[in-house]
Amino acid sequence: MSSNTWPLWEVFVRSARGLSHVHAGSLHAPDAEMAVRNARDLYTRRNEGISLWVVRSEDIITSDPDEKDSFFESPQGKDYRHATYYKASEGVKHL
Amino acid sequence: MAATTPQNAGLSAVPSYEQEQSQARFDALIEQDSRIEPRDWMPEAYRKTLTRQVSQHAHSEIIGMQPEANWITRAPSLKRKSILMAKVQDEAGHGLYLYSAAETLGTPRDELNDQLMSGRAKYSSIFNYPARSWADMGAIGWLVDGAAIANQVPLCRASYGPYGRAMVRICKEESFHQRQGFEILLALSRGTEAQRKMAQDAINRFYEPSLMMFGPPDEQSPNSAQSMAWKIKRFSNDELRQRFVGMIAEQVKVLGMTLPDPELRFDEETGRWIHKELNWDEFMAVIKGNGPMNSHRLERRREAHREGAWVREAAAAYARKYENSEVA
Amino acid sequence: MNHDELDATLDSFGDALASATRVTPGNALRPEDIAVDGVVPDEDLAQYALRLGDDALILAQRLSHWISRAPELEEDVALGNIALDVLGHARSFLTYAGLAWDKTEDDLAYWREEEEFTSLHIVEQPNGDFGVTITRQLIISIYQYLLYSKLAASADPTLAAIAAKAVKEVDYHRDHATQWTRRLGLGTEESAQRMRHALEILWPYVDEMFQDEALHERLGDRAVLPSSLREDWEQQITQVLTDAGLEVPQVGMAMARGRSGEHSEHLGYILAEMQVLARKHPGASW
Ligand SMILES: [Fe+2]
Ligand SMILES: [Fe+2]
């Protein structure tokens, strides 16, 4: 990558108060100030957002997809973490 | 190592146990109609096919700005000028969304852009025709964006996550593009004799190229089967072309215009539309670079890139000097 | 694919993406509303609105040329947004002015002659390289920001409403030009040199922006006296230039009288291009 190439940024948009920022896509910008402005121009042309985050793509740490099984296996089968597991109390009001 | 083709994808001489496992997981995800995400293992051929398709798609959006940008400064009313400007600008956005998706497959945008500027990459050949009259803005919106939408809606479900997500955003934005084009033609069709002539002429010129936007007939489209197996493509070229021609055959009546295809009719027996023989020789010639505008379209891209070099350089230099000392 | 089908297809993806792509038209003042709701302005007010409309129209025409030619694709989109905003302002002002003479925005844009245009010379200056366009943007957007800020308090409610909407947009244009001025001023030796050149060729047209006319005096608290903007403008632009390692150029001021229809050699070409199609088809609707 030549030194004049603008880095890649990931863009997150909050579409309304009360909602989380959601990943919208990415773009190139020379620096953070321009990145957030480019994000505004590119991802909120139709009132899609009231707040934006931009993060340098290279700064994002991802869980390793190859370890998917060991990483996300544990919660599987622990249905006692969910209310639906408790059948005996079904029908009891306000519980 | 032999070049990977869709046919021998992922099959090296002696696949390792890990490779087999990865392939099996990939196959299972495709089978379940789930999505492949950037960091997942994927067959090299899948990556290559997608990179080529998504970047070609991006190039088409970017080159496609030119014929319409050609009329922004001459738009015949301020309202039309606003609409056209917003539309052409949307296409730049679409190009960006798609380059983003392509980049997640591992090829940086610079490199994709080099491929375009050097003439190694392809893009939709329809943009190599000139936009000669204002009515072309109507015909392009109605027929070219229309064909693009017919192509793109199924792509929202493409098996590669970032591509599908980019397409969702694009399809939402495209919905106004086709309508504004149709309404340009509608206004012309209700206008003066000269306006009606202009509209019919534009429809005549863009009809056939728009049908060819779906690609060669199925029997001549060898890669389609693999793309469909990978669930990148959901419908064949001919299926999409059929749907499209059926829609515009009806819509053109609202305009009180005709499609330049006297043979066009719906065949009750086969349940298919019969349309005229499309000129695939010309299509191939344009793809190869011999359309009326190929050279100009690419040079315009190169020129913008060249003229902008000092700006990109200055911004990069500024970032190196000051980036860490400031907040947005 | 009809639109319901499209919507249904898109909806079938659930709300995972919905929140990032939720679109609304917004509810700001549009030129169409002015045509319907606007009270007919008197001659002076219409002349004033015409000036603001012409500035915006010619600037938008210039800016729109950048789309598909910007230094980077992201900048195509940014300049496109700015051009669209400015064109929107033009349409509102011209629509309002036209009410006085029973003319539409298009009558005014397409069927007036060069000498009937009242735009400032600064907006008709050629785009030049990106540095020239950014410098022109810096000069005009700070000016329009100050102007619309004050005009939002105009005693004329329609002008006030147009300005209140426009000022927020122009504020962003000012920011865009400021950001770029800093990057180009402090980036490389070449970019700084280009910015110095841009300032030199554009600065002569600054004076005209602040010339008062009898019209302004007559309009009183319905208009903004151009000369009243000068001090703030100079202070703001000097600050931006200083922050960018640039200086206010020491150049003379051009005799520019765009307000009375005396233009440079550029406007004729701008209008020839803008009006050619409309004039080929008199009476046609589009
Ligand atoms: Fe598009
Ligand atoms: Fe489009």
Image: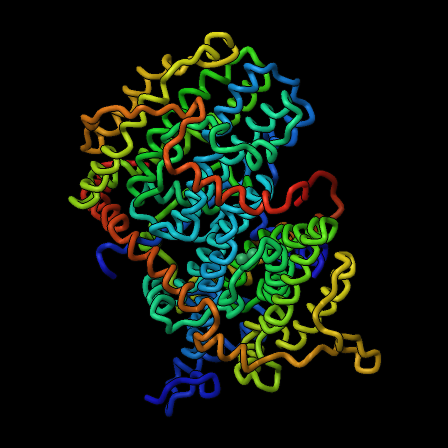
Q: Position of residue B276 (x, y in %)?
A: 69, 79
Q: Is residue C152 left or right of residue B153?
A: left
Q: In the image, is residue C205 above or below residue B82?
A: above
Q: Position of residue B120 (x, y in %)?
A: 37, 74
Q: Is residue B25 visible?
A: no
Q: Is residue C34 visible?
A: yes
Q: Is residue B41 left or right of residue C182?
A: right
| Pick the front one: A19 or A69 | A19
Q: In the displayed orientation, state which residue is furthest to the right.
A: B268
Q: In the image, is residue B49 above or below residue C229?
A: below
Among the 4 quarters of the image, the one containing residue C14: bottom right
Task: Quadrant for the C terminus of chain B, please.
Answer: top left
Among the 4 quarters of the image, the one containing residue C8: bottom right
Q: In the image, is residue B227 above or below residue A54?
A: below
Give the mark count. Answer: 0
Q: Position of residue B42 (x, y in %)?
A: 44, 74
The residue drawn where x is 46% and y is 67% is B293
The residue drawn where x is 35% and y is 89% is B2
| Pick the front one: B275 or B120 | B275
| Pick the front one: C197 or B236 | C197
The residue drawn where x is 42% and y is 43% is C78
Ligand 1 positioned in quadrant? bottom right
